[in-house]
Amino acid sequence: MGSEKDSSTIEYRILEYLRKNYPVKIEDLRKHLKISKQRLERVLKKLEARKIITIDRVSDNTVYVHLVHFSKREYKPGKWESMYR
């Protein structure tokens, strides 16, 4: 996940755009990033394989990209919470 932290990478720019404009069509994302459709498809497939995003194909022309919500770290119960369960 180190590549998403560098603000110059396409992955980071995609994730930032998805956080602000959710959900988004692939064509809108491509226009915003000003990259080719093939390059965008490759990057989106990588992010989908890593389970960071999901791609929802509604029809031939409409494809939505959804950001998967996940916690930054696993929740570990504290001392008192484990005692009073």
Image (cartoon, rainbow, N blue to C red):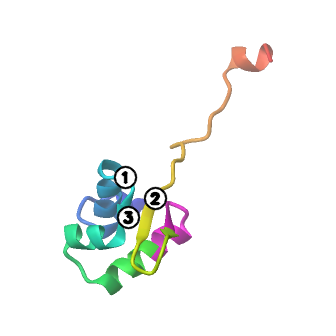
- Residue at 47% x, 74% y is 46
Q: CA distance from mark 3 to mark 1?
A: 21 Å
Label 2 secondary element: strand
* Residue toward you, 33 or 23: 23
Compared to residue 31, the image places residue 4 above or below, namely above
Please report whichever mark, 1 or 2, sits nearer to the chain's N-terminal start.
Answer: 1
For disc 3, the marked residue is 3
Compared to residue 41, the image places residue 16 above or below, namely above
Compared to residue 35, the image places residue 32 above or below, namely above
Q: Are marks 1 and 2 in contact (CB under 8 Å)?
A: yes
- Tell me residue 15's x, y (percent): 35, 58
65 part of magenta stretch: no
Quadrant of residue 51 within the rendered picture: bottom right
Q: The residue under label 1 is which amino acid type?
A: Tyr
For disc 2, the marked residue is 66
Q: Around disc 3, counting alpha carbons within 10 Å, would you say few (fewer than 14), some (14 to 19), or many (20 or more)?
A: few
Label 1 secondary element: loop
For disc 1, the marked residue is 22
Q: Is residue 37 left or right of residue 2?
A: left
Which is in the foreground here, disc 3 or disc 2? 2
- Residue at 23% x, 64% y is 8
Q: CA distance from mark 3 to mark 2?
A: 19 Å
Which is in the foreground here, disc 3 or disc 1? 1
53 part of magenta stretch: yes
Q: What segment carries the magenta color?
A: 45-55
- Tell me residue 1's x, y (percent): 45, 60
Q: CA distance from mark 1 to mark 2?
A: 7 Å
Q: The residue under label 3 is which amino acid type?
A: Ser
Q: The residue under label 2 is which amino acid type?
A: His
Quadrant of residue 10 within the rendered picture: bottom left
Quadrant of residue 9 within the rendered picture: bottom left
Please report whichever mark, 3 or 2, sits nearer to the chain's N-terminal start.
Answer: 3
